[in-house]
Image: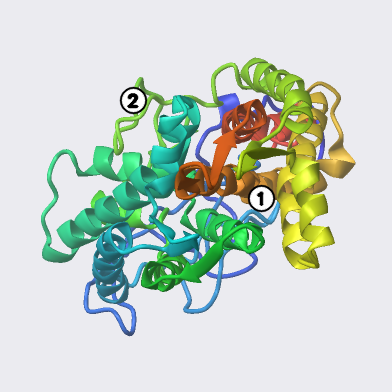
Amino acid sequence: MRRGTFRALSNLTIPEKPRANPIGRQVTAQTAIQAHAGDTVLEPAEARLKACRACGLVQSLPAPRPSHDRKCRRCGETMGSGLVHLDVVLPILVAAVIAFAVALTVPLARIELSGQHAEADPMTGVYGFLNYGNWPMALFTFVGVTFAPLGRTVGLLFAVLCVRIGWRPRALPRIYRFVEDLKPWSMLDVFLVGALISMTKLHDLVRVEMAAGLWVLMGLVWMLALFDSLFDRHRFWDYIQAPVEVPAGTDAVSCNHCGLLQEPALRCRRCAARLHRRKPDSVQVTWALVISGVILYIPANLYPVFTIVSFGRGNTSTILGGVRQLLDGGDWPLAIIIFVASIVVPLIKLIGLGWLLIATRRPQPRRLIANTKLHRLIEAIGRWSATDVFVAALLCGLVTLQNLATVVPGPGVLAFGAVVVLTMVATMTFDQRLLWDAAETNDEQH
């Protein structure tokens, strides 16, 4: 591939005769409706061409096949299976909403000390932080454990049900776009791990008993994981509104939200999001967030995350101190989880994002695929840093046994929570396509 022959993706035009995809037959928009085995709902046609969200390459995709995932032929980024399975995912979503309602009302765990009892549910951590005036962490816990996962589950149920019965309200594209924006902040699986670690930490202090709500939460996490494995959330946009082919020779731009390739405009013709060829001020905003995260990472590890007060005596615990306590107690698997999630993962995110930002200014053609995989890794592991935040939230909300035992949040948890949020937002604001633009590999798209 020659470099510098044409201008970058900002001047991309749709070719009149695109090359056939070497990994499968071309999917054309002329096929108005396609039926797949196992689905009673006819699937809409898929756009003839799509742009990879990671590298920007415009390409034709092979036809969807069960148990197969389609990947970008240049960078390997997943472009979805192309299958939605409406009749299968609909009952899963109904069961998930019911399980969520049960999980919010049934205790997750119970503790007992000297005749005093306390119970924990998903909202316990929110109340615990609020009782000590730590409203930023209370808000983060509420969003990650209740608002985002519940809002996403209910919103998905509404969207899938609308498509299933053939009703397309005008607000449906905006609702589904909001549902998709909630996905990175839905952290029920992270909260579940934090709950298990919290109960392990309390074994030496109080008597801990697992309640029915914990099993319901496990089932809910499993159902949502099963749903994600069967549901191509990018392909579902075609069910909401079918794509329209861009005329040959037209300057084209891909929506950052729904992925629709279309003529330049102020807003996307399908999801109404603002249309940009690249995320605005991506490098500058990401640098600001990364630098802020590096600054806050220091007090997050120096200051105590929480203080356990038992019978009038206090014992502070930093992140590394908590790891050491778990090792001393023989709980080395949980110690490894905390160390990786709270120490290693934030470092990988901060150093990795810094490296990617430098790569946008210093082209690295031979490392483009490796850098794309690095961003994919940062995106996948980013939210697991919140494990220690949820541990502190549950301990502060659950252990409130007056003068016998209490857990007080420390300044470290606020700094660490800020690092988690900043690095997650930085990962979202960084535009991977800038790496390929800098190396001039987007000069020849076809």
Q: Please give the name of the residue rendered at 19% of the width and 59% of the height, measured from the top-left corner.
A: 163
- Foreground: 147 or 264? 147
Compare marks 2 and 1 and give the one earlier in the sequence. 2
Spot occupied by residue 403 in the image (x, y as percentages of width and height): 51, 42
Q: How crowded is mark 1: few (under 14 residues within 10 Å), some or many (20 or more)?
A: some
Side of 92 relative to 365 (left or right): left
Task: Identify which amino acid the numbered label 2 is placed on.
Answer: Arg
The kind of secondary structure element at disc 2 is loop
State the image quarter where residue 265 is shown.
top left
Tag shown at residue 267: 2
Question: Visible in this render: residue 390?
Answer: yes
Q: What residue type is labelled 1?
A: Ile
Question: Which quarter of the figure has residue 143?
Answer: top left
Residue 381's mark?
Answer: 1
Residue 250 in view (yes/no): no
- Number of numbered discs overlaid on the protein picture: 2
Q: Position of residue 260 (x, y in %)?
A: 40, 42
